[in-house]
Image (tube, rainbow, N blue to C red):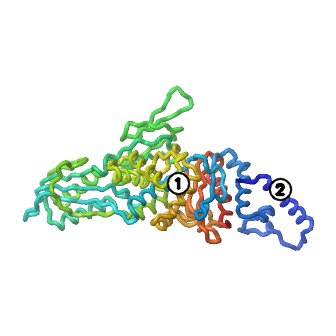
């Protein structure tokens, strides 16, 4: 912990040294402040006398009176994974809002269950027989497996139109010219694309964008207006609710700036099937039957596979999720965990899977409140010490190297590309988190001496701008490179 008295004495010594230097300095010696464009930060006399750990503690003490953090609730810990000891800390056992550092728990659990090389399959199948005229006396089936990247081009997966083209080529190659049956979508894995929102979401943190996440949410998006209701028309302090058109839940919001709010298509699997049917008709392949969705098929008929689309590997999905802090992919992974472990692809089941996994890794659940898979609710809570011990345990896993490479690099990639551009550039590997008046970081530090340290820095309810709090984070973390 910080030694405030020692800090005061060092400041006094530094002040004396600086007074002496000013009265005895030779006038011909150039001063730093006379050199325009100098990039190096000025080192105060008192800091030059301190060890790296003491420098960190001085910075922590300074934050108590800093106008940006003076009223903030924040916690910080630097941890040595070799000795399993805290190097320096402040408020490390305080439960704080983690924002998108929550994704560390979700994506690591997915790695643990699936492995980095895991892929999801989306298959086109057929039943019945094909006669010499190319008439299929049977049905076409689209069978999904809960691919979290389905239709999401940002991960490198194919588009919905690309998947339809793949299926069309398979139908032609098989010589099918007419389908007497239906196109059936089995949605037992997809389930319905609805969700009950976690509590305490701040809408403006997400650009007024509702996230009805599901495994196929990005297929053929369309705009939908939200129903906006004023909470109390007689209240001068206007409050509003946003209501999703796809469920009956109303969510409180502090304010509404006006303009259109958007969501995604409610039933993407059926949309994919309808797109396939439209393409078949346009190509002269008759399909008199309709598109039918089934949750499960209690008496499945014999079928053959026409085409199989494989998703990107889980390692690629996690890499994109962590680099870009993608909420939709993280929530989709959460639902996939629920399905593959418990056979129920809903967020609540996925959360139970993550909690059970964390308990099995001896995660410190004191202060933990895991309410969604991506951290977009302010009801999420975690302690800095729990985060660093979790990240320390991850270093022993066989997939640690691949997972480590998924994290943004200070000054170079992902959500850290514009932070730590000087002193810590390329030395910090961490997941970021951002909500209104919340800024967080958790990950690893590569010191100048070659050591790997683990850290967590969670700042809640700061004042000032995002740029100002980022600057304070850099001030706290830069000296750790010399530990």
Residue pointed to by mark 1 = 101
Mark 2 vs mark 1: give the one in front: 2
Instruction: Identify the residue shown where x is 53% and y is 44%.
Output: 378
Residue 154 position by quadrant: bottom left
Q: Earlier in the sequence, mark 2 or mark 1?
A: 2
Q: Residues within 10 Å of mark 2 (few under 14, many from 20)?
A: few
The percent coordinates of residue 108 (x first, y second) are 46, 58
The percent coordinates of residue 26 (x first, y second) are 90, 71
Question: Relative to 198, is 237 on the left or the right?
Answer: right
Quarter of the image that includes the C terminus: bottom right
Q: Residue furthest right?
A: 23
The percent coordinates of residue 11 (x first, y second) are 82, 57
Question: Relative to 82, is 293 on the left or the right?
Answer: left
Q: Residue furthest left?
A: 132
Q: What label does residue 9 carry, if any?
A: 2
The answer to whether one can see residue 270 in this image is no
């Amino acid at each position: 912990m910080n030694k405030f008295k020692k800090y005061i004495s060092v400041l006094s010594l530094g002040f004396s040294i600086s007074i002496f230097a000013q009265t005895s300095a030779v006038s011909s010696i150039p001063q730093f402040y006379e050199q325009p464009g100098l990039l190096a930060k000025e080192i105060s006399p008192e800091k030059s006398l301190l060890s790296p750990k003491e420098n960190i503690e001085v910075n922590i003490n300074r934050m108590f009176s800093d106008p940006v953090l003076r009223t903030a609730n924040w916690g910080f810990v630097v941890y040595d994974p070799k000795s399993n000891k805290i190097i320096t800390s402040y408020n490390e056992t305080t439960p704080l809002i983690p924002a998108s550092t929550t994704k560390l728990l979700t994506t690591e659990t997915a790695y643990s269950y699936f492995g980095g090389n895991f892929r999801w399959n989306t298959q086109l199948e057929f039943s019945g027989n094909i006669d010499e005229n190319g008439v299929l006396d049977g049905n076409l089936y689209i069978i999904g497996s809960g691919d979290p990247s389905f239709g999401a081009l940002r991960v490198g997966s194919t588009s919905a139109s690309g998947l339809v083209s793949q299926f069309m080529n398979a139908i032609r190659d098989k010589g099918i010219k007419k389908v007497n049956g239906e196109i059936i979508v089995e949605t037992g894995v997809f389930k319905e694309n609805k969700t009950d929102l976690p509590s305490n979401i701040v809408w403006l943190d997400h650009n007024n964008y509702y996230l009805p996440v599901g495994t196929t949410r990005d297929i053929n998006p369309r705009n939908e207006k939200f129903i906006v209701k004023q909470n109390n028309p007689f209240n001068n302090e206007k409050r509003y609710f946003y209501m999703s058109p796809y469920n009956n839940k109303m969510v409180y919001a502090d304010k509404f700036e006006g303009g259109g709010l958007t969501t995604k298509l409610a039933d993407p699997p059926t949309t994919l099937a309808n797109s396939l049917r439209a393409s078949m008709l346009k190509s002269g392949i008759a399909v008199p039957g309709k598109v039918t969705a089934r949750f499960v098929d209690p008496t499945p008929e014999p079928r053959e596979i026409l085409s199989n689309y494989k998703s990107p590997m889980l390692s690629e999905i996690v890499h994109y999720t962590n680099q870009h802090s993608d909420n939709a992919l993280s929530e989709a992974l959460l639902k996939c965990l629920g399905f593959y472990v418990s056979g129920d692809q809903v967020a609540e089941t996925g959360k139970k899977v993550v909690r059970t996994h964390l308990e099995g890794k001896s995660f410190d659940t004191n202060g933990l409140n895991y309410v969604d898979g991506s951290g977009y609710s302010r009801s999420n809570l975690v302690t800095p010490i729990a985060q660093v011990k979790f990240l320390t345990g991850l270093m022993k896993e066989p997939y640690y190297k691949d997972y480590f490479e998924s994290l943004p690099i200070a000054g170079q990639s992902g959500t850290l590309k514009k932070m730590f551009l000087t002193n810590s550039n390329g030395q910090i590997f961490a997941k970021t988190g951002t909500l209104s008046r919340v800024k967080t970081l958790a990950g690893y530090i590569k010191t100048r001496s070659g050591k790997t340290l683990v850290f967590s820095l969670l700042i809640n309810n700061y004042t000032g701008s995002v740029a100002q709090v980022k600057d304070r984070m850099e001030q706290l973390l830069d000296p750790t490179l010399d530990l």
